[in-house]
Amino acid sequence: MIPPIVVQDEIATGQLWESDISLDLTESFYAVTMKRKFPNPLIGKLLAQDSL
């Protein structure tokens, strides 16, 4: 399985196609951050939302 964006050219040319079968898969992304002298306020808001 691969995200369609990765093979968008192959999908456009018909070499590959998307299946309509749903497997109810999820994917998690994690970021490691270090304390900064001048923190980015947008990143602070994003990190605050994640801790809810």
Image (cartoon, grey):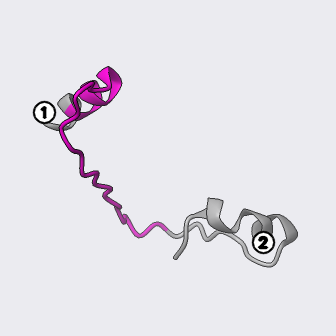
Farthest right residue in view = 13
State which quadrant residue 33 falls in.
Answer: top left
Q: Is residue 34 left or right of residue 17?
A: left
Disc number placed over residue 52 in the picture, else none? 1
Residue 13 image offset from top left, x and y in percent: 86, 70
> Is 39 placed above or below 21 here?
above
Secondary structure mostly seen in magenta is: loop
> Is 32 placed above or below 17 here?
above
- Position of the C terminus, as image quadrant, is top left
Disc number placed over residue 35 in the picture, else none? none
State which quadrant residue 25 falls in.
Answer: bottom left
Residue 40 image offset from top left, x and y in percent: 32, 26
Q: What kind of residue is marked 1?
A: Leu
Q: In the image, is residue 34 part of the stretch drawn in magenta?
A: yes
Instruction: Give the magenta part as a residue range.
Output: 22-47
Residue 21 image offset from top left, x and y in percent: 52, 70
